[in-house]
Amino acid sequence: MKKINIGLIGCGVISDIYLKNCNSYEHLEVMAVSDLDQKRAEEKAQQYSIPSVLTVDELIHHEDIDIVLNLTPPGGHYALCLQALNAGKHVYVEKPLSVSVPEAQELIDTAKEKGLLIGAAPDTFLGAGLQTCRALIEDGAIGQPVAATAFMMSRGPEQWHPSPAFFYQAGGGPMYDMGPYYLTAFISLLGPVKRVTASAGMPFLERTIMSGEDAGKKIPVHTPTHISGNVEFESGAVGTIITSFDVQASKLPFIEIYGTEGTISVPDPNTFGGPVVLKQKGSDEWVEQELVSDTVENSRGIGIADMAEAILENRPHRASGEQAFHVLEIMHGFHEAASLGKHYDMQSTYNRPAGVNETLVTGGNQ
């Protein structure tokens, strides 16, 4: 099988799982890495047997690289993705697609104009857990979906991340950081959204780093850290999502989908596996469901693997830029609605990708 060559930019915490998984697919090869910290890039290259350490410009313009994998912080997504697209490279980027809707739209338009693919995390919706939930809904296990809830409640990444400042800048906060997992789950299960509204809070104007070399250092907060949003799906279902960095503890479920004939308890959308638990009308029991595939371990990178297969097979890829754009606009809509005190009407929509009822691609760490 022909290999698709990847150049990875951004050798931070998230790069390890991508480097581990991407090189395990028979049709992928990570051939170069780049980071502003040259030493860090060299360490990753040595650890994962990557052939080359390049500057960002060298990597983007390398003639043998097919896909640029952008794992930089959110503020760097737009400029680097646009540069890569203009250099004729396909692009896959960590979430969110960009920190602003106009920038993200330019990326989508540029990719389309140049006949290139752009994809984006998260790809957890391709895992066995969420795909099982989708299959149950499509098979009518809960009847007509009427509502959904999602909760991401935590104390904030300064508790564990050694350099958390970017989480509290524009494009950060709990919604932009973790919202993509939950909202991608929402739309992959229930389809596109037509209107949103929200309330937002920012009770703490600074945070204290709790780990690493900067432990004890104060960082300013420039974005809401508690957002309660409501979504109206095009299907007529209504959803509620709360994301927060201001909560000391919570026992709320990750996601639940409610239908006319039952309820599905959806697993953590930041993971790939289960459990998936179903309670149907007329039953007193919650029943754990058999998963539809064996994609249950941390399979980050499966989205770019599917994208590479799509390039080889000339078909649509699943973790698409259009899907990521729709999620970004929902998050933008929450912030705008909270700021202006009104509903936000969505301008975008998207077509759900084909489902997965078996291992998505050859290889990986399944």
Image (cartoon, rainbow, N blue to C red):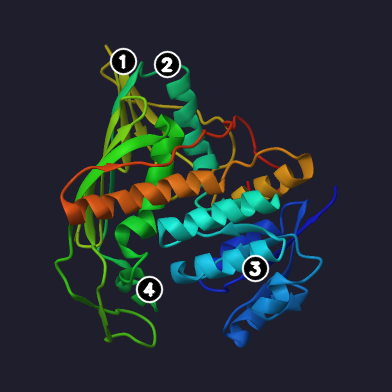
Q: Residue 359, which numbered label?
A: none
Tell me which label, 4 or 3, sits earlier in the chain. Answer: 3
Q: CA distance from mark 4 to mark 3?
A: 20 Å
Which numbered disc, 3 or 1, marks the residue closer to the eye? 3
> Is label 2 in a helix, a strand or a loop?
loop
The residue beneath circle 2 is 140
Instruction: Evaluate if marks 1 and 4 touch, with contact meaning CB atoms under 8 Å apart.
Output: no
The amino acid pointed to by label 4 is Phe
- Residue at figure coordinates x 43%, y 41% from the top left: 348
Q: Quadrant of residue 38?
A: bottom right
Q: Please rate how many residues cluster around mark 3, counting C-alpha atoms within 10 Å: few if below 14, some from 14 to 19, many from 20.
A: many
Tell me which label, 1 or 2, sits earlier in the chain. Answer: 2
Q: Residue furthest top?
A: 282
The residue beneath circle 4 is 166
Q: CA distance from mark 2 to mark 3?
A: 41 Å
Q: Residue 8, which numbered label?
A: 3
The amino acid pointed to by label 3 is Leu
- Residue at figure coordinates x 67%, y 81% from the top left: 55
Q: CA distance from mark 3 to mark 1?
A: 46 Å
On the image, the x and y values in percent for residue 333 come to: 30, 49
